[in-house]
Amino acid sequence: MASTSSTASTNQGHIIKLKPEKFPTYESHLSSFRSSTSAAPAYKYDVFISFRGEDTRNGFTGHLYSFLNDQTGINTFIDDKELDRGKPISPELLQAIEDSRFSMVVFSENYAASSWCLDELVHILECIKPGKSIIPIFYDVDPSVVRQQSGTYAPAFAELEKKHPAEKVKKWRFALTAVANISGWHLKDRFAFSLPPPVSLKL
């Protein structure tokens, strides 16, 4: 079994450090993903990935999708379209969230600047029921920033509060705090994402 914490480095980048006291191993989650097919046959997808496209689509999230869907055989949904600003979240995307056993939320530096991402997150939280799970991934952003909407999330919310009703903003804040309090993966270095051998994704 691979360790949940590593300090090794390579010429291409650094292996991500994980906090073993809080964050579970990759293998434990992958085992759950694999077993979900037989445990919950009603679900169309094993995993739904929520992410900010401009932050991680062509890097971390793209590699994560490739690893899960192509290399590991975990049926994974990812929205592959660049969305127009201001457009409401599509019914198809909402349905994909409902049809997924797991939701992986990739929190990145500019995640909170997207009302689309935040609407996705609210729906993910609203769909939680026995048999469904949320796994947050904190990519180059500290969990406390997400939890408290501080750091880069503070100015993002200052802008959102100018454009959206207070009740909607309140739902977004609640969803961020709630999901950031769930055990997940904290990736503190954007250069590499270490996965169980022999896979290591260099970003």
Image (tube, helix red, strand yellow):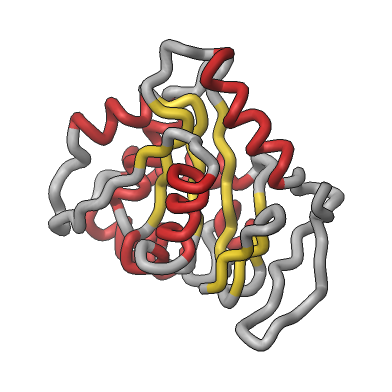
Residue 52 point in image, percent of width and height: 37, 58
Q: Residue 28 sits in which quadrant? A: top right
Nearer to us in this view, 59 or 133: 59
- Report which quarter residue 122 is drawn in: top left
Image x and y of residue 82, in percent: 20, 58
Residue 174 seen in render: no
The residue at the point 28 percent across, 46 percent down is: 79
Q: Residue at x 82, y 73 (%)?
A: 7
| Residue most extreme to the bottom | 11
Residue nearest the observer in this picture, 12 or 16: 12
Q: What residue sits 47% from the left and 29% below the top? A: 46
Q: How many labels does the image show?
A: 0
Residue 91 picture location, percent across and down: 19, 30
Which residue is located at x 33 percent, y 61 percent?
53
Q: Can residue 128 be seen in this view?
A: yes
Residue 177, placed above or below residue 123:
below
138 left or right of 158? right
| Residue 89 screen position, x and y as percent | 21, 40
Give above or below for 99 relative to 201.
Answer: above
Residue 156 located left or right of residue 88: right
The relative height of residue 4 versus residue 68 in the rendered view (above or below) is: below
135 or 71: nearer the viewer: 71
